[in-house]
Amino acid sequence: MYVSFDIEQFIQDFSKSCNKVQKKSFKKNVVITSYIQKRDQLCILISGSADLVRYDLNGNKTIIDHFSKHDVFGEVFYDVTTNNELLVESKENCEVLFFSYSDMHNKCKPGCKFHEKLSEYLPELILDKVTTLNMRVELLTKRSTRDKLLGYFNLLSTKALNKTFTLPFSLTDLADYLSVDRSAMMREIKLLKDENIIKKEGKRITLLSH
Amino acid sequence: MYVSFDIEQFIQDFSKSCNKVQKKSFKKNVVITSYIQKRDQLCILISGSADLVRYDLNGNKTIIDHFSKHDVFGEVFYDVTTNNELLVESKENCEVLFFSYSDMHNKCKPGCKFHEKLSEYLPELILDKVTTLNMRVELLTKRSTRDKLLGYFNLLSTKALNKTFTLPFSLTDLADYLSVDRSAMMREIKLLKDENIIKKEGKRITLLSH
DNA sequence: TATATTTTGTTGTTTTTGCAACAGAAAAAT
DNA sequence: ATTTTTCTGTTGCAAAAACAACAAAATATA
């Protein structure tokens, strides 16, 4: 998240001042929330990391989105019309702020600092989400596993301002994120190594410019 | 776009009152804008329809997004770090409103009605965009061409509140939108017809519940 | 620290998808 | 109204990806 204000400070300052906001803690590998009904729920991840996942009828898991510290997520971003259940699963211990998007307009009380500030910041947070999603679409529309991998690696490299970077996922999860078969992806990674396009030591990848 | 205010009215009322907003007209099949530099550009499509497309090095075209009347688009939604050029191409004659996202904060003049209203409405417009993009990701993460087709058909059917609906694309464009090979998609559509899962007359599709 | 669980790496086989090429239908342009 | 262009529908073949299954390595857990 690259936003122009200090979310940490914002949460510190205001989260306790508003009685419509709930703060909850979660252990690793539990369900934080599921998108099934239209509850208008909006969440901010204060600490930890989590995935938005879908399990389809064949048991395939897809990582629809990956959230880390200060990311915004929630049902409000979805038309819950799909038949598949969407779950937010904690990957580490997490702290999460829950509130309702409609409360943004009908404020809890006049002059609630939390809601006031949040509605000021929210457009920027959501805009950031659009940017992330657009990059995701860019990746997923690549035709081959190789292009998806290279596209994603380029992204991480750009983010890190470095040809070398660390995968934020296990390779198993990376396959679910790129929506490809894991073994096929592993085969492709091996080819990329053999062709000297990348170097790989565990989760550290280096792009070798040719 | 399902938003709670009347965009048409809004454009009518305010677009002329602001000198930082430009209204331009485009013929069919021309480039409306390209996402190359960070210009903070934000656009509203007043009439017509357009696609956001990417041509990759192999000449593959991908329809990244499809815009119709009242949709919001623009460079501001992208981190233009990808190597491929993104173009917005008109599919019909179009009228487009251009302005800059940063002007949303530094208003053109105190009390400009256009910017005032726009910054009020914008979160909702952007939120709608997030929902659309999330559905797009849902589609693109489906593993097979069949699942992509059925996912998309279900979406259109839900939108139309009807088992029968009309494709907003040519079949050629649909393939580019689902990011699959056209002939492979045609083959899959034939199978879906043969298996009595769908009925198809031109661009009118009917989902046959089994 | 020992044991259980998850992740990584690999490969043969099957299935799906992409590519190429073409003819007929439909739509657009002149 | 005729010509040109785009779109649809189809197919054989090649390439890529998915599936399945397993051993070794790394992590997590008791």
Image (tube, coloured by chain):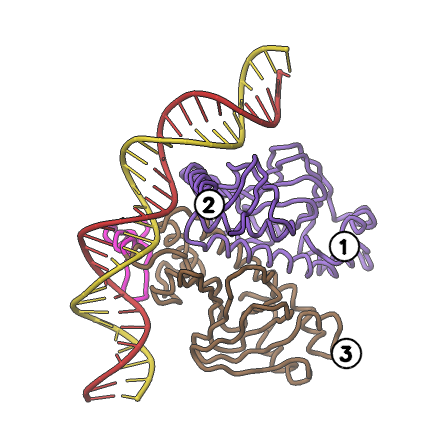
Chain colours: A brown, B purple, C red, D yellow
Tag in front: 3 or 2: 2
Tag in front: 3 or 1: 3
Residue C11 image-quadrant placement? bottom left
Residue B121 image-quadrant placement? bottom right
In the image, residue A69 lies at what x, y percent? 50, 73
Chain of residue at mark 1: B
- Which residues make up the magenta segment? A187-210
Chain of residue at mark 3: A
In the image, residue B26 lies at what x, y percent? 67, 35
Q: How many numbered tags mark residues here?
A: 3
Q: Is residue A208 magenta?
A: yes
Any part of residue B60 in sight: no
Pointer 3 local density, CA inside 10 Å: few below 14, some 14–19, many at least 20: few
Q: Is residue A97 left or right of residue C22?
A: right
Q: Are marks 2 and 1 on the same chain?
A: yes
Q: Is residue B206 magenta?
A: no
- Give me the residue at 62% from left, 66% from top: A76
Residue linked to disc 2: B179
Q: Is residue A134 left or right of residue A124?
A: left
In the image, residue A210 lies at what x, y percent? 30, 48
The residue lying toward the viewer, choosing from A61 and A187, is A61
The residue lying toward the viewer, choosing from B51 and A81, is A81
Residue linked to disc 1: B108
Q: Mark 2 and mark 3 in contact (Cβ < 8 Å)? A: no
Q: Mark 1 and mark 2 in contact (Cβ < 8 Å)? A: no
- Give me the residue at 75% from left, 61% from top: B120
Q: CA distance from mark 3 to mark 1?
A: 28 Å
Element under label 3? loop
Residue linked to disc 3: A111
Pointer 1 local density, CA inside 10 Å: few below 14, some 14–19, many at least 20: some
